[in-house]
Image (spheres, grey):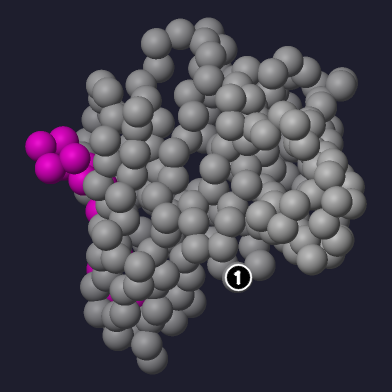
Amino acid sequence: AQSVAQPEDQVNVAEGNPLTVKCTYSVSGNPYLFWYVQYPNRGLQFLLKYITGDNLVKGSYGFEAEFNKSQTSFHLKKPSALVSDSALYFCAVRPPYSGAGSYQLTFGKGTKLSVIP
Amino acid sequence: EAGVAQSPRYKIIEKRQSVAFWCNPISGHATLYWYQQILGQGPKLLIQFQNNGVVDDSQLPKDRFSAERLKGVDSTLKIQPAKLEDSAVYLCASSLVIAGGITDTQYFGPGTRLTVL
């Protein structure tokens, strides 16, 4: 069975500093990995995904994530945090494709990011 | 491009009552998902449709939850009778089907926040 761990419930960072939100995963085969962001009273908004190729994936709003197969990690990063980045961040994993069917997306429990002015 | 639409945004009911949620996916997205997100947790898949057929309902509590997507577009999720533990945000998502039945990135609606008293 696949699983995702987000070890930090909350991350605090000063505005302008770099931020990292951690994610590790467990899945059979090569993973498909995703990051979503959730603002209060809103649905999940897609940020970026890793399918294959370059280990550094660039996404929306200046976010990027680094895939590390040996450490089974997919940490979300941003060089300079903004107050508007404060939100709940979810990492998700799904197994690789092996034909049509259900490829359930499994989410972590989320990390609350607070960017302090 | 319009996103995933959901209604109502909020619903308060008493236990043992029934409730229904509606979802309209992004135009052209053949795959539709319903998720349950309990406070402090990541979303959990309840059911996945491809067109009007069910792909995965393994985590749907079928004694009280039902869902349909009769014409392969809009979908309705129903709870009857509701329990206190059903208090959660119910998220609808949709995705394209690429060649071979493979599904693409999931895009989420704003969700319906259900409170069961």
Residue B20 coordinates in the image, percent (x, y)? 86, 45
What amino acid type should be assigned to the residue bearing mark 1? Pro
- Residue A60 left/right relative to B71: left
Residue at 27%, 23% in the rendered image:
A28
Does B23 appear above or below A63? above
Read off the residue under disc 1: A40
The boundaries of the magenta stretch are A67-81
Does A16 appear above or below B105? below
Number of other residues with Cα within 10 Å of mark 1, as a class: few under 14, some 14 to 19, many 20 or more? few
The local secondary structure at tag 1 comes to: loop
Residue at 52%, 11% in the rendered image:
A100
Residue B57 figure quarter:
top right
Does A17 appear above or below B104? below
Residue A99 coordinates in the image, percent (x, y)? 46, 8
Residue at 86%, 21% in the rendered image:
B70
Is residue B24 among what the camera can see?
no
Quadrant containing the C terminus of chain A is bottom left
Quadrant containing the N terminus of chain A is top left
Residue at 49%, 29% in the rendered image:
A104
Residue B23 coordinates in the image, percent (x, y)? 79, 41
Q: Nearer the viewer, residue B18 or B55?
A: B18
- Residue A89 left/right relative to A17: right
Residue A114 figure quarter:
bottom left
Q: Nearer the viewer, residue A88 or A45?
A: A88
Does A76 appear above or below A55? below
Asked whether residue A70 is drawn in magenta, I would say yes
